[in-house]
Each structure stands twice: as structure tokens, then as C-alpha cells.
Image (cartoon, rainbow, N blue to C red):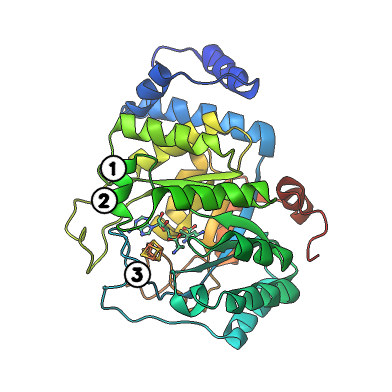
Amino acid sequence: MLQNMTQRELDQFAENIINGYKLSDVELQELLSINEKDELNKLYSISRKVRDHSFGNRVFLYSFVYFSTHCKNKCKFCYYRQSNDIERYRLDAEEVRSICKTLKNENIHMVDLTMGEDPYFHDSPERFVELVKLVKEETELPIMISPGVMDNEILEELQKNGANFLALYQETHDKDLYRKLRVGQSFQKRMDARSFAKNTGYCIEDGILTGIGEDNDSIINSLHGMEKNSPDMVRVMTFVPQEGTPLEDTKSHSSLSELRIIAILRLMFPDRLIPASLDLEGIDGMVHRLNAGANVVTSIIPGDSSLEGVVNYDRKLEERDRDPKSVILRLKEMGMEPAEQEDFNRIIGASTCGA
Ligand code: SAM
Ligand code: MD0
Ligand code: SF4
């Protein structure tokens, strides 16, 4: 559909999106079927234009703190699933405090506190509340929590103590596929937790996986599924087969589908946060994702850190380069730069950061 469009028509397409045009399912199908390089580049250029309209060349940066890799669940795709025989850690308060101190002077807009569904915290959620409180006191930054599904009362308590954003990815809005992936976990509970959080004033992030057995109809279903809760942030990540998991031997996919979906997400959610995760392909991968229309860099980890990622492309590499300085350097080479903290606070509605 973009193939024969002139530059004027492409510009007009972007304008229409900016002015509120909603893509039809037929158009979504066509966009999802684009494979040809020139046409993909046209798609990315429209999506960048739409992004730039809301965000200019300014990018938001999230620091990733995977503070416990213990988990009671058995998600088929995940390295940290309960039965995987791997080394795990759980940081104590002082270790978290020391990470916060290193974060302070970096150009970070939000701290993402992520864990597996670790019974140590899930059975005694006041421990997690304490951790959130500590991170808020130390950093005075907005806090994203990615703890899995927690009860409504706990979400409220966490919010009172400084949590601003809940990341809870459905992975797919196709219930059959969900059942196969998030084995033994309720589809509805996950949906409800996100929607409760949204209604109590959290910002929320939903996300899907690609390369995990979905077809274009299933992707469209998921895209509309994500629309329903009016998420503040939407993500897509390429499924990367993990050692020791049931999907270990699945064929791995390139990032093409992810990049195409990032661009489509930008057209469906023009003014929302869309991440370029460093967790999949590091800084080079970040560049492609930003060029496809993302406007947030996630999974930033201090240079000297031994924290894990989720996909963790650099698990076996000796050197990691997903620290704030390397990210900012590369952003500048791309003609982009970190946004102001006030811009981020305005977007997430946290006018008094630290309060
Ligand atoms: N335990 C919490 C949960 O599951 O909601 C928090 C962790 S959550 C942020 C981990 C996310 O990483 C999953 O929701 C999934 O989208 C993504 N992920 C996990 N394993 C992956 C893999 N092998 N490939 C791609 N994405 C993966
Ligand atoms: C990322 N490793 O952005 C993180 C993670 C959790 N909120 C996010 C999947 O790639
Ligand atoms: Fe646990 Fe989250 Fe991994 Fe599922 S995705 S196994 S809940 S850490």
C-alpha cells in the first residue's frame, strides 16, 4: 500500500494519523505484510514523522533493576521460569540502595523495578512496598514496577509509596496462545490488574511478543486488545528462545517483525511511549528500534552492574554496553537526545516528582 506512494502522499498519510485517522483492519493486514526494504523504509519514515510530531528528537531513558530473578511461574518463553535450573539472586535493601546512588547522576527518567513472581515478595508484599519507598527516597525519580500480577490493595499501597507506572504485558490478547505461553495463569486476572491500576491513577504498559507462533490475525487481535485499556506505553518484543526452557529449540527470528510492529504501534498510538529495549540486541538494536518509531530506551543497566536482563542478549558477553553514557552518546550520533525530566513527569502526570 505504501509502495507506489509519492513523498507527498506519505507525508499526507502521517498528517492523517496525527489528525486522528484510525487504521482499518485491512490496512493493518497490509502493513503487517510489508517485507520489501524500500516499502519498510517508507513505513518507518511515516512512523518517525508521527513520533517527532509529539516528541521531537527527545528520548526517555529507563533504568532496569531486575531485583529478584526468583519466580513461581512457568511461562514457557522465560529463562526465569520456576523449573529452570539456573543461578538466581534476590537483592537486599542495601544492594538496591547502592544501585540507586549510582543512578542519581545519570540521565535517567524512570527506574523500572522488575522481579519474577518471587514468593518472598508476593507472599509478604509489604517487603516490596518497603523497597519502592526506599527507591523513591533515594532517587526521587518516577518508578515503574514490573512485579507480575499483584492484588488491588497492594497496588494501591505501592502507589501511595511512590510507584507511578505498572508494566504488565499480556504477551498476546489471543486467549488460546496466552494459555500456551503463560501456563496456568489467568488471562483475565492479568487484564484486570492492568485495568485496576489504570483506574487508580497508575500509568500502565502493555506488551506483546512476536515470533512465538502468532499470525497476522492474532497480531491484529492483540493490537486491538492493547487499545482497550488505553495504555500509556505499548511494547512489542521479539521472542528469543532461552536455554533450559520448553521453547529452547524454537527457530529464532530476526527483529524484522518487531520493527514493523513498532512502526504500526506508532501509527495506532501516536502520542504514547514506545520502547526500544536494549535487552534484545543492545545499542545497535536500539538504533533500529528508534528509527522504526520508538521514543524510549529501556533496560539501561549501569556499566559495572551484574544485574540480569530478561532476554539478556549479553548474558554470555564479557562486555556490556547498555549504560547511560553509551546510550546517550549513540543518541547524539543519531541527532537525538535525552528529554527533560519535566517533560517526562508531565506525560506521566507526576508533577511533583518524589512526592
Ligand atoms: N515477572 C513479571 C511478569 O512476568 O510480568 C515481570 C517480568 S516481565 C517484565 C518479563 C517480560 O519479558 C515478559 O512479560 C515478556 O514479555 C518478556 N520476555 C520474557 N522472556 C522473553 C523471551 N525469551 N523473549 C522475549 N521476551 C521475553
Ligand atoms: C526491557 N528488560 O525493557 C526490560 C523488561 C520490564 N518492565 C521491562 C522486559 O527490555
Ligand atoms: Fe516469571 Fe515473569 Fe518469567 Fe513468567 S515472565 S516466568 S512470571 S519472571
What residue does disc 2 label? Answer: 180
Task: Depth check: give the residue in front, 10 or 294.
Answer: 294
Type of residue at label 3?
Answer: Tyr
Q: Is the distance from the Cβ of mark 3 to the nearest ligand 3 atom less than 8 Å?
A: yes
Identify the residue under disc 3: 80
Q: Amino acid at mark 2?
A: Lys
Quarter of the figure with residue 106? bottom right
SS under mark 2: helix
Residue carrying label 1: 176
- Residue 326 is left or right of residue 109, and the answer is left
Q: Quadrant of the N terminus?
A: top left
Q: Looking at the image, which residue is at 48% across and 80% down?
A: 120
Looking at the image, which residue is at 40% across and 49% down? 187
Q: Does the image show residue 17?
A: yes
Crowdedness near tag 2: few (<14), some (14–19) or many (≥20) residues, C-alpha within 10 Å: few
Foreground: disc 2 or disc 3: 2
2 and 1 marks in contact (CB < 8 Å): yes
Q: Residues within 10 Å of mark 3 (few under 14, many from 20)?
A: many
